[in-house]
Image (tube, rainbow, N blue to C red):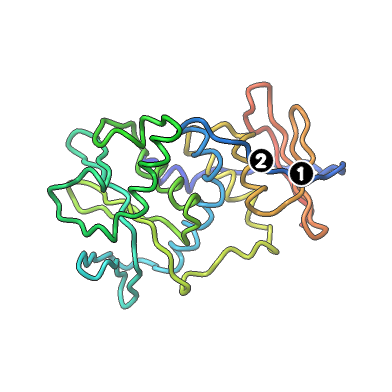
Amino acid sequence: MSLFKKLFGGEKQKTEPQTGNYNTVKKTDYTNFQDLLEQNAGLSFEKQRIFSDTIGQHAWDFDMGKGTISFGDKDFPIQIIGSLAFNNNSWMWGWANTQSGMPENLLKHSYELKQMGEAKNIPEFVDGHFNVEEGFEHKIGMIACGLFKSKSYYCANYGQGTLVVTIDDDRIPAIDKNRPETITTNFSMLVGGMDLNHKNTFQNYLIDREFELNISENKIEGLRNNSTIMAEFDELDRLVSMSGKL
């Protein structure tokens, strides 16, 4: 089963929510690729689901000259992050793909990620071309979408590979942070299909959703506008149960 299909797979478990002392929590500083993924995966996954609903079943069309990707009669401005080649499962950053003639103005996000990698010594951001594991294109899309606060990312399959872009357009609905009812479903889907530290990812997702948090060794409780959500984890930080009073 492909990663993308798995992402839309999981199920949620329920327990009764509990109360606690809540505080505003900020994200910790990142030191590697996995940190960045877990800091951005939750909200980016929710954005991706909204974007999927927005474009429906329309096929994509890319206009490099205009710097847009189109779905039916809707065209959106993009930033090119990089591409995945299917023949050897290798990733190439947009900034490293000098043979493609990609306009520099479409590579701003790609170059900014390279600069971040140089500053933090993150090999995945600095190496121009390297072999990757299954699902890397979604991981880098989620990271870029989160870091640049884009409305979505998109993996455009062109037959021989996949082009990863970020998309930012006011016609794409924003997440309504006053409606937390989708969090449990989205999070179950996400961790059901991607290798993540569940506890770290859940904590960062609630931070992005502007919850105040009460964090203990094996439990995270969130509070926002009288809505509460709680998740419990085992000794390996894997999700055990999740519930909410929303």
Residue farthest toward the front in the current orientation of the protein: 119
- Number of disc labels: 2
Task: Give the Cα separation between the discs numbered 1 and 2.
Answer: 8 Å
Question: Left or right: 88 with respect to 224?
Answer: left
Q: Position of residue 144 (x, y in %)?
A: 43, 49
Residue beneath the point at 33% across and 35% down? 126
Q: Residues at badges 1 and 2 in contact (C-beta under 8 Å)? A: yes
Q: Is residue 97 left or right of residue 59?
A: left
Judging by the rendered image, the residue that carries numbered circle 1 is 213
Q: Is residue 238 above or below residue 182?
A: above
Q: Amino acid at mark 1?
A: Leu
Q: Secondary structure at mark 2?
A: helix
In the image, what residue occupies the spot 30% across and 74% down?
72
Residue occupied by mark 2: 203
Residue 220, image x, y percentages: 74, 38
Q: Residue at x 47, y 39 (%)?
A: 193
Amino acid type of the residue tagged 2 in the rendering: Gln
